[in-house]
Image (cartoon, helix red, strand yellow):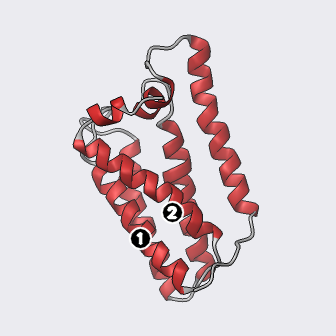
Amino acid sequence: MTLEPFFEASLAIQIHMIAAMGAFFLGAVVLWIRKGNTTHKQLGKVWVLLMLVTSFSAFFIHEIQLWGNYSPIHILAVTTPISLVYAIYAARKGNIQEHLRTMKATYIGGMVIAGGFTFLPGRLNYEMLFGDSQTDVFEQAGGWLIPIILAGLIALYFSRRRPFEINK
């Protein structure tokens, strides 16, 4: 494992990765803790901010170019802020089930699934974790399977987990 590829990456990628990693871990906490209290609301606001930074910074990353400077992952950069606004609107209107459903979907889609793809061979996280991005066929297959299996397990865990309480 090496952080050298991170430090050699562009500033946009560095900002994106720091915000995404913060959002990944903080989002897990927010989804896990007791809902509706002050702690949940405050941590949720920080999580939303980190998700917005992650989404916005994605527009300055052009490593994969399928449509001009953009790729399918940029669709998330557009839909994530929309989902966040919708989820906040739902909570303020008292539709807590819709708020929870939207926030879970945003976390799983934006953090777990999209984040999992950053561990594919040739991507920065793969290079940081496993070293050289030049791999053989078996390593590439493992590179695809690891994030997919991990994303599925995390999604399953959060879909069945009861939250624990944190005092206000």
Q: Are marks 1 and 2 in contact (CB under 8 Å)?
A: yes
Secondary element at tag 2? helix
Packing grade of label 2 (10 A; few <14, some 14-19, many >=20) is: some
Whether 128 is drawn above or below 79: the answer is: above
Q: Residue at x 52, y 57 (%)?
A: 25
Q: Position of residue 113 (x, y in %)?
A: 55, 46
Q: Is residue 57 visible?
A: yes
Whether 85 is drawn above or below 93: the answer is: above
Look at label 1 and name its amino acid.
Val
Position of 30 with respect to 45 (left or right) is right
Rendering quarter of residue 55: bottom left
Position of 90 with respect to 8 (left or right) is right
Q: Position of residue 48 (x, y in %)?
A: 42, 68
- Please give the label number shown on residue 46: 1
Q: Earlier in the sequence, mark 1 or mark 2?
A: 2
- Please give the label number shown on residue 111: none
- Please give the label number shown on residue 26: 2
Whether 3 is drawn above or below 141: the answer is: below
Q: Residue at x 60, y 73 (%)?
A: 100
Q: CA distance from mark 1 to mark 2?
A: 8 Å
Rendering quarter of residue 10: top left
Q: Is residue 58 visible?
A: no
